[in-house]
Image (cartoon, coloured by chain):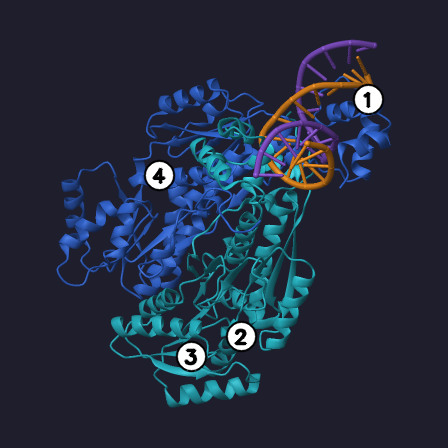
Chain colours: A cyan, B blue, C purple, D orange
Amino acid sequence: MAGIKDIAEKANVSIGTVDRVIHRRGRVAKETIERVQRAMEELNYRPDIHASNLSSGRRYRIAALIPELTQDSGFWGESAEGIRSAVSELEQHRVDIEIYNYDEWNLASFGGSLDRALDDGADGLLIAPSTLTDRKTLFERIPGDVPYVICDSYIPGTNCITYVGEDSYQAGRTAGRLMADMVANGPVVALRSLPGTEHIGRRVQGFVDVISERNQVRPLSIDFDSTMTDPQVDAFVGRLFFENPAIHGLFLSNSQINRIAPAVLRHFKGERPRMVGFDLVPANRDLLANGSIDYLIGQRPEEQAYLGIQILYRHIAMHRRFPPEIIVPIDIICAENLGNYSTRLAVEEYAMTNPGDSATG
Amino acid sequence: MAGIKDIAEKANVSIGTVDRVIHRRGRVAKETIERVQRAMEELNYRPDIHASNLSSGRRYRIAALIPELTQDSGFWGESAEGIRSAVSELEQHRVDIEIYNYDEWNLASFGGSLDRALDDGADGLLIAPSTLTDRKTLFERIPGDVPYVICDSYIPGTNCITYVGEDSYQAGRTAGRLMADMVANGPVVALRSLPGTEHIGRRVQGFVDVISERNQVRPLSIDFDSTMTDPQVDAFVGRLFFENPAIHGLFLSNSQINRIAPAVLRHFKGERPRMVGFDLVPANRDLLANGSIDYLIGQRPEEQAYLGIQILYRHIAMHRRFPPEIIVPIDIICAENLGNYSTRLAVEEYAMTNPGDSATG
DNA sequence: CTGTTAGCGCCTTCAT
DNA sequence: ATGAAGGCGCTAACAG
């Protein structure tokens, strides 16, 4: 494995110069830079991360900007799990990670968290923009030398180093497929929460498309206001099934199926309509386990957060480049495969005890 | 962060002695050992993996014993992908990984690969025992100081450091659930390949149980001999549907659905029976994509292999301990969510170019 | 602009 | 049984 010394030799310079080229620390003649870079390529140089980490005692700070963990039925708690996974693996690599929560309905709150993160000297940001609409302006506050990764929902036109998220349309199609298989011909209804969000709109579109392709009856598409109180939801559901008594399937386009399912169950004595929702949040997990709903679509929020942070670290510390977007798989979860889903992503999280314990060595 | 030097100071010894205690390299007075260990605990010592790796230039060798990549419709190629993922991440950590394939129907072939791996000085083994039945005796050949992880199918009574695999029964139940949702009441058939394998038996059991719980008609359970030639499979399918014309669903308990589906499609002009199989091997992926079959159950073979190797490395190099078994999630895959499944597991695999490329200083 | 040098924390050989 | 010392590959401060 070629090292910095070999490069220095091949390029007829000292290791100090090579180091300056690698880290673009300036003060090197243009011609020398090229010579060194050529040597690096020819020898296929890869820095020794151990030597590098050991030598530069510096620590990296990564800030994660996500909504309050309680919002969206606890969906953001899943993201937090992924961040914890990243912590367990990166703490050995001199990386400090901190979560800055914000109120997803409050633009100023986002701004405040962003400012705090930057004040704390974050070297990189993981940002889940969630519902904030004109959040794009906020991105302009981020200094050019602070890289960031966007996860969960996409915002066009930023210069994030990567977007990590789901393919919303395919996620909606997947929900539709399951519904179509359960309800061969009966009419179904798609409840659209957060009608404003593009992200959610694409899910509903995917769902509607598949049902239309596979079913005789076009699905109903109705807006669902998630700020309703429980009694209001109850009334909403009562009206829905009174006006459309034939409905055999119900789909909700975000994590709030746990708001609706209880009302639906109260409404039906005998066979209930089939239900498909999104996200493996605790309340939904329970509904799945006891058979109150049928399927959930998962978008791996933990994995998104974990990947985002790992990418930031590698970008910052190892100058790696990444593709502009990474699409994570869409999970289908039912009572039968629910049990094996875990939030452990990092191998380190499986480790149990202190060093020096085994008989080896 | 306390280092070896601090411990030496606190225990009134030299760093050399501390090192000997840490690595159990002997030649230290009992009383000294205790004094050092106490100091380690009090200071909550964690070795700096970077310094450690840098200093001890030693490399670790991990051998992966898996069947020929072409066997089981290419299933083991998926495992190989996971191994490649591990390579991409561990090559920076001075780990050499080599795959030793063997013929899954040939016990001697397994033994030969094992011997070669050991001869090559493997420090740890990842073993996928597959179909071999009295493989347990082979495990006795492994020297006590060579740790190993078993993946894919479990063998009781070995002293592997961890088993990484699926919950076969739940996997079967998941398949059954999907089938029951598609075929509300019609009779369905479960084809049992490799009838001898416990692993496969549990899948069939899970499938049968769910269908029995949800359907009126108990599923037929029939053995399928995967060594049949294509014409034989054709005849087998013809006979099956001639004798049971009402069958509306067909399940196969391993990756070979691609052997059967074409014959079934030839047999049916109009609506075909619903089909569920296992494993996202290339041929099955195609069947799913073009609508020839309905669902596949995935057991994440890449993740199993990746995890197994990461665990071995951490066990060998960092003396970490792991739980005796790790059960991976069961994936449900259909045409709609097929596209986003990828075999990239290591963050490193997403990285695109050489170091020193970004604008960051 | 470029070369030199002193560590980073740990491992390992060599003396004692 | 224990201590001393050199070195792993890279970083960064300093000297030219």
Q: Are marks 1 and 3 in contact (CB under 8 Å)?
A: no
Q: Residue at x 58, y 23 (%)?
A: B145
Indicate the amino acid at tag 3: Leu
Disc 4 chain ID: B
Q: Residue at x 51, y 44 (%)?
A: B356
Q: Residue at x 51, y 72 (%)?
A: A136
Select label 4 or label 2 by which is in front: 2
Q: Secondary structure at mark 4?
A: helix
Circle 1 is placed at which residue position? B30
Q: How far apart are the alpha carbons under marks 3 and 2?
A: 21 Å
Select label 3 or label 2 by which is in front: 2
Q: Position of residue B159 (x, y in %)?
A: 56, 30
Mark number, residue A132: 2
Q: Secondary structure at mark 3?
A: strand
Q: How far apart are the alpha carbons under marks 4 and 3?
A: 42 Å
Question: In this view of the protein, which residue sits in the foreground, A335 or A310?
Answer: A310
Disc 2 chain ID: A
Q: How far apart are the alpha carbons under marks 4 and 1?
A: 51 Å
